[in-house]
Amino acid sequence: MAALINYTLYFNPKDFPEKYVIRKFYGEDSTSEYYVFDSIEEVNKHPSVINMYWIPRMQEDEAQIVGVWI
């Protein structure tokens, strides 16, 4: 069974302060693929997440997580 590809959106992570970052995951395994943005408008136009389903951050998620696309 193939792992589900998902993209997690972060705001203000330690490695990119005051930036939005999309990180690609295979299931729960992170990959080296990521994208950095200055604004949420730029994020929403990125081809990796267009036509994907958005799930907002859950209360138990890390504070930097905004949500996930699956």
Image (cartoon, rainbow, N blue to C red):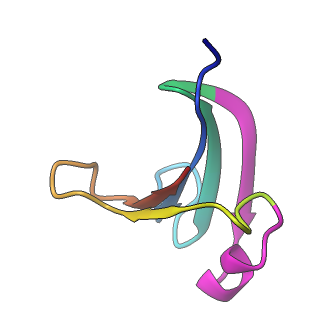
Where residue 52 sits: x, y (%)?
64, 61
Q: Which residue lies most toward the right here? A: 47
Q: Is residue 45 magenta?
A: yes
Compared to 57, does 29 lie above or below?
Answer: above
Residue 32 falls left or right of residue 22: right
Is residue 3 shown above or below 34?
A: above
| Image point (83%, 65%), residue name | 47
Image position of 64 with respect to 28: above or below: below
Q: Which residues are magenta?
A: 31-47
Image position of 13 (left or right of 21):
left
Q: Nearer the viewer, residue 56 or 33?
A: 56
Residue 6, x across and y down, in percent: 59, 43
Q: Nearer the viewer, residue 59 or 3?
A: 3
Quarter of the image where one finds residue 5 = top right
Q: Quadrant of residue 26?
A: top right
Q: Is 60 left, or right, of 17 in this rendering? A: left
Is 40 placed above or below 58 here? below
The residue positioned 37% from the left and 58% from the top of the image is: 64
The image position of residue 30, as x and y in percent, is 58, 28
Residue shown at the point (60%, 34%) measured from the top left: 25
- Tell which residue pokes out farthest to the top in this image: 1
Q: Position of residue 12 (x, y in %)?
A: 46, 65
**Residue visible at 60% across and 22% down in the picture:** 3
- Give the left or right position of residue 22, taking residue 34 as reference: left
Quadrant where the N terminus lies?
top right
